[in-house]
Image: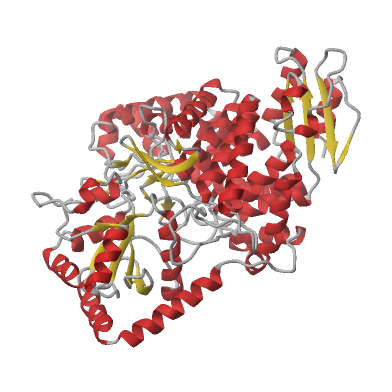
Amino acid sequence: MTTNRKPNRLISEKSPYLLQHATNPVDWYPWGEAAFNKAKREGKPIFLSIGYSTCHWCHVMAHESFEDDEVAALLNKHYVAIKVDREERPDVDAVYMKVCQMMEGHGGWPLTIFMTPDQVPFYAGTYFPKQSKYGRPGLVEALQQLNLKYTNDPKHITEVTNSVKQALAKTVSSKSKQRLNNDFIHQAFHQLGRIFDFNYGGFGSAPKFPMPQNSLFLLRHYYFTDKTAALKMVELTLQSMASGGIYDQIGFGFSRYSTDEKWLVPHFEKMLYDNALLLNVFTEAYQLTDHPLYKKIGEEIITFIRREMTSREAAFYSAIDADSEGEEGKYYVWEEEEIFDILGNSVGEIFAEVYDITPYGNFGGKNIPNSINVSLRKILGDKNLLQQLETAKEQLLKEREKRVYPHVDDKILTAWNSMMIAALAKSGKVFQSENYTMMAEKAMNFIEKNLIKQHRLKARYRDGETKYNAYLDDYAHMIIAYLELYETTFSLYYLSQARKFSEQMIDLFWDEQDGGFFFSGKDSEELISRDKEIYDGAIPSGNSVAAVALVRMGSLTGEMYFLDKVETMYYTFYDDINRQASAAPYFMQSLQLTENATKEVVVIGNKNDPARIKLLNILQTTFLPNVSVLVTERSEDLITIAPFAAEYRQLEDKTTVYVCENFSCQQPTTDIDKAIEKIIEK
């Protein structure tokens, strides 16, 4: 960050990213009418820069260009410059990222857009060095040439902007006459198989992202089809990542991606959403296989989140930077002699052997601890070795904490918090830990108190300020979080909240003409295009999560209204999924639930009844993605939430179980063992 300068308009913003640019010599505006009006009044194009506070190349571009007086002079003279935090305004980011991908064939951050005062782009790119290098055009050159083009060739600018508007209009999915079916689930599986790395796990080549939504889909595919290849893909991926440098072996938690195919050298930035989704995968993998590694990693992720990403008010921060003291990974890497100085020769040698610590290092002469070349079974099977390594890690962490800590983006985002709440609730259920459930409940309590204003969910909280109408992602993930809390605690309050927010989500985001959900609500700011996305990116798309949420809502409440919306989506997104089914693996979960047999279970009984406790314990710890469980002490309490079950009766004052399958219900039973057998059988 530049110092000793007069602050620009960004100084009054709350976003850590915008505040990083508040002392730039660039005359930055936040996104808003003031900037657009100035551009119209002065006949200037807009220079839009989108990034986020823990983005390495955003820092590089800021240092090279936005802190530079020559670049600032060009920007201030010829453009109106706008800065946007993509994590606060994912709606703005989604539209302009789509344009960049259309124009350049790829996207990323920093995202750089040149556009008219009416917000329509005529040029797009990502990182620009100050002067041309790396085969990339320089920002100085781009600013000069595009200003001349904008001033002297308005006809060309109009042609480009018209074609951009037409292309954007075509990207919004419209309803097909054909419906998605079971074939597309198998297509997605085979497509993932084709890009799977059978040596190191994961999908595609370097840089390699964890892609947890692929694993969530594959776990279900294995469950429904018994195809062992699906489970093997997940297990190799999880075990390889857990051994690699992408996993912080000392302080736990996953980095955003690996720069190589082995998962050795990470991009050291840690995101809340990655760790939430991966916690989900490791928890489900443990539920399905009982492999102790998956529980160990799941619990370590929670330890990391509690220690480094939880606010005093019990909500979760957004991200931790890759850089500290201007160097990527400096906080996380080690010299060999440091390890031996801290641990001593005897333990140092054991640690160095297991975690690949050498005099030459594996990252610029230093070491990223990893156990890629060590047998996991050997480590997990030797309790004495495991204990020595755990103690060594505690010593190293204590020493590491004396270093300069990376920047933390302490925004509280509703969608990302909801992802972590859902994962913690699931871990609380599967690992039978009240502490994990309590973490989830406290965070949800924070959202309810601080991120709902006039009955409208909001997207971001920071430093006492709540801002921005929540987006589709916020609603969809919030509903999933409530459902997971319900399935962990069986408190009907959480199910009623899930129902309320599902109804709000449909009201605010549903496309009445073509089906599917828009990214922004009908009460939100109007942009040049109203985005509607089905493909998953680093996080699952809002439509994917909404579809899964509504299928689960329909099963639990018995309300066909929710299932009808998903049915419509199978027509809306037919063409997109037909192009590439594996690009929307989270959405495929909804298809897995509607195209395979599901079971709806209603349990009525006293919460202290040992029979009820035994039944629910088994249902919670067993991987049963196709089973929804409605639990109550008194069936009349269900009348406003799940009216279909309000007339169900408890028999003989015993815990009574109703099992419905394929739209037909069986006789209720008080024989708990028989009920368990019936529910668990495929």
Is residue 596 visible in the rendered image? The answer is yes
Q: What percent of the width, then of the height, locates residue 433?
A: 56, 23
Q: Is residue 45 left or right of residue 418?
A: left
Q: What percent of the width, then of the height, locates residue 102?
A: 46, 73
Instruction: Locate the C terminus by quadrant.
Output: top right
| 488 versus 55 height, above or below | above
State the residue in front, 531 or 617: 531
| 596 versus 610 height, above or below | below
Is residue 215 visible in the rendered image? The answer is no
Residue at (28% x, 69% y) in the render: 46
Q: Toward which corner of the image does residue 105 lie, by quadrant?
A: bottom left
Residue at (56% x, 50% y) in the render: 508
Count of marks, rendered view: 0
| 410 versus 42 height, above or below | above
Q: Toward which corner of the image does residue 486 lie, by quadrant?
A: top right
Q: What percent of the width, then of the height, locates residue 31?
A: 32, 57
Q: What percent of the width, then of the height, locates residue 420?
A: 50, 37
| 675 versus 281 height, above or below | above
State the residue in front, 130 or 448: 448
Colour pattern: secondary structure
Residue at (50% x, 31% y) in the render: 444
Q: Is residue 109 left or right of residue 550?
A: left
State the residue in front, 131 or 370: 131
Q: Residue farthest to the right?
A: 667
Residue at (65% x, 30% y) in the render: 487
